Image: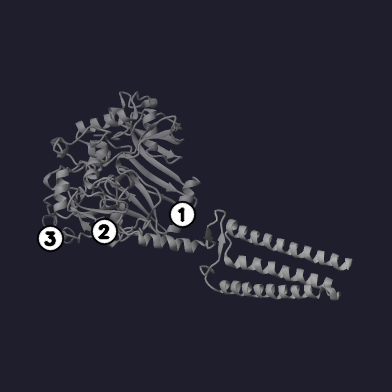
């Protein structure tokens, strides 16, 4: 009897241990579900393993007490427990298998209790969360009376011009100059972050000061300003994020040198041209069709070119383009590894020293918009090698080898050495002081230099040589060029200004459309008619149409700096020397 009591006590102890273990394992599963965010398949697997361990534990107890007839009633309990656990395991295994065959979002309705006593779903899959957020967005419709803004469209990250862009207008030649018939152009942009919450009136008044507010009010009435492709009827409309703005303008381009552009090489991989002076490489500022990219596309059928390097507008010489992206990446790698050699020639003021002259002064950009630079200890390291080729008693022809590629590097280093390029409108200017910044001695701040430079060219009526955007001329960085009523003063009317509504700070867009939204049919003749008198259509809102500007002179279109040679590991391209670089050239 004592033995039976002992066995009974042990069985009761095992039952207590079994209940305790079941409770602990259940708590463990709940914690795992809450902290690790496992899905139902993982939970089902863990519970199945737990039940299997329970069955095995019961089997061991059964084996231990099966020899005694005194434990039959406990054996019966154990068998019932085994059947119950086996049914639970089979059921949960079936649930786990079904969920594994369905989508991840198929989650059984299983709730667990949080520490706060509230029930929280263990469905933490991300797709469900995103779906829920989408539903919340749909539910959060715009309020009544609120202006709808369509979502932004995907934009092409690359810049590629096609026949649609080339057909916007056409060229004509007059007195040795290449000219462009005026044409209509759409400036397009999405609302910038600093514009959000401001009205169109405030944005035009503060950032697009090339035209008066009276002009913009008239443009609104003419339907030339559109917001999300809808004509604007009031400039007091408040801008919102993702607003799409389109401004149609009548565009005039300054004339450039009419000299034909010679294609030196076109082998399917690269295109090499001899760029005439006065031509920008790519569209910028007031220049679009009078650029190398557009001339090659319109006259030579070359489009989709990749720019490898650039030349200043007034610089002539070798200019290299890649025909494919692969070739462009290859040449860019050569540039970064400094495997390419560039050779320039220039004519400088005075007698340049004999022998090799090396300048390693660092160069700092004073104004990114203007591209104005100076020698400064805070600048980037530079290295240029110079060698005199000839001297005619007043000026010297100098060979230049830039070993780095900083902005205006050759021009700035020659100014530092005291031999600026003979007709350099920026670094040969007296605005730098009596010594023209020789040795880096200026005695003025960057702002004072820029202001003095603008004032000098304004007095000479040659502001167009600086390629200044409007905000540099009429904004805080320089004296104003507009009268109180917003119209340009008479001094500015007499010369071609470098920038207008098409300045680099106007709403930029690399893609244009032919004028087909609200423009009269007669305006299409700007592209189609071949003769000057029929092609030139005056626009009643365009201020440029009311101004007769004198044509630039040859000295305004040429700077005595020429890219003579471009050499790589397995190629070399070169041009002829310009006339001003020859020994027998006589200075006017």
Q: Where does label 2 land, which residue?
A: 166
Q: In front: 232, or 438?
A: 232
Task: Report the residue at 32% width, 44% height from top.
Answer: 194
Image quadrant where one finds the C terminus: top left
Display coloring? one colour
The mark found on residue 522 in the picture is 3
Residue 65 in view in this figure: yes
The foreground one among 499 and 421 is 499
Q: Which labelled disc corresponds to residue 329?
A: 1
Residue 422 position within the rendered picture, expressed as x and y whole percent measured from the top left: 30, 33
Label 2 to label 1, Cα distance in Å?
Answer: 26 Å
Left or right: 108 as drawn, with respect to 276: right
* Residue 160 % position (x, y): 34, 58
Label 1 sits on a secondary structure element that is: helix
State how far apart marks 1 and 3 are (Cα): 45 Å
- Which residue reaches farthest front? 1
Q: Earlier in the sequence, mark 1 or mark 3?
A: 1
SS at mark 3 in the image: helix
Which dot marks residue 81?
none
Residue at 40% in and 34% down = 364
Q: Residues within 10 Å of mark 1 (few under 14, many from 20)?
A: some
């Amino acid at each position: 009897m004592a033995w039976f009591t002992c066995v009974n006590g042990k069985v009761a102890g095992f039952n207590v241990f079994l209940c305790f273990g079941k409770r602990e394992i259940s708590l463990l599963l709940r914690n795992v579900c809450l902290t690790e965010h496992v899905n139902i398949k993982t939970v089902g697997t863990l519970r199945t393993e737990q039940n299997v361990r329970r069955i095995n534990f019961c089997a061991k107890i059964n084996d231990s007490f099966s020899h005694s007839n005194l434990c039959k009633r406990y054996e019966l309990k154990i068998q019932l427990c085994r059947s119950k656990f086996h049914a639970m395991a089979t059921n949960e295994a079936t649930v786990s298998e079904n969920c594994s065959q369905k989508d991840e979002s198929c989650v059984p309705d299983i709730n667990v209790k949080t520490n706060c006593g509230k029930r929280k779903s263990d469905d933490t899959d991300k797709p469900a969360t995103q779906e829920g957020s989408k539903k919340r967005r749909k539910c959060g419709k715009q309020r009544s009376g609120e202006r709808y803004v369509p979502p932004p469209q995907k934009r092409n990250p690359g810049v590629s011009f096609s026949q649609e862009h080339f057909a916007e207008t056409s060229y004509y030649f007059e007195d040795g100059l290449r000219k462009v018939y005026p044409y209509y152009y759409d400036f397009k942009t999405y609302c910038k972050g600093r514009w959000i919450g401001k009205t169109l009136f405030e944005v035009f008044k503060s950032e697009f000061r090339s035209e008066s507010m009276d002009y913009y009010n008239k443009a609104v009435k003419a339907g030339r300003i559109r917001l999300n492709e809808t004509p604007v009827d009031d400039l007091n409309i408040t801008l919102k994020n993702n607003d799409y703005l389109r401004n149609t303008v009548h565009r005039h381009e300054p004339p450039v040198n009419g000299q034909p552009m010679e294609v030196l090489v076109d082998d399917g991989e690269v295109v090499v041209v001899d760029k005439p002076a006065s031509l920008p490489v790519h569209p910028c500022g007031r220049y679009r069709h009078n650029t190398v990219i557009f001339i090659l596309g319109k006259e030579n059928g070359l489009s989709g070119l990749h720019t490898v390097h650039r030349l200043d507008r007034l610089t002539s010489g070798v200019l290299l383009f890649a025909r494919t992206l692969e070739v462009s990446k290859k040449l860019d790698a050569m540039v970064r590894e400094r495997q390419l050699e560039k050779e320039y020639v220039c004519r400088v003021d005075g007698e340049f020293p004999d022998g090799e002259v090396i300048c390693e002064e660092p160069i700092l950009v004073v104004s990114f918009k203007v591209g104005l630079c100076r020698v400064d200890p805070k600048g980037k390291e530079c290295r240029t090698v110079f060698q005199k080729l000839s001297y005619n008693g007043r000026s010297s022809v100098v060979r230049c080898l830039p070993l780095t590629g900083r902005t205006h590097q050759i021009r700035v280093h020659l100014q530092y050495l005291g031999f600026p390029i003979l007709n350099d409108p920026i670094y040969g200017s007296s605005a730098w002081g009596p010594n023209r910044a020789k040795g880096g001695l200026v005695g003025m701040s960057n702002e004072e230099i820029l202001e003095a430079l603008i004032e000098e060219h304004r007095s000479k009526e040659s502001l167009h040589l600086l390629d200044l955007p409007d905000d540099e001329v009429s904004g805080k960085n320089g004296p104003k060029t507009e009268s109180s009523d917003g119209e340009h003063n008479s001094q500015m009317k007499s010369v071609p200004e470098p920038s207008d509504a098409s300045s680099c700070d106007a709403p930029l867009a690399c893609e244009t459309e032919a004028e087909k939204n609200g423009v009269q049919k007669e305006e299409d003749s700007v592209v189609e008619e071949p003769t000057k008198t029929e092609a030139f259509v005056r626009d009643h809102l365009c201020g440029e149409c009311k101004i007769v500007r004198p044509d630039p002179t040859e000295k305004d279109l040429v700077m005595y700096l020429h890219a003579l040679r471009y050499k790589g590991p397995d190629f070399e391209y070169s041009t002829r020397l310009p006339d001003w670089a020859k020994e027998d050239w006589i200075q006017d």
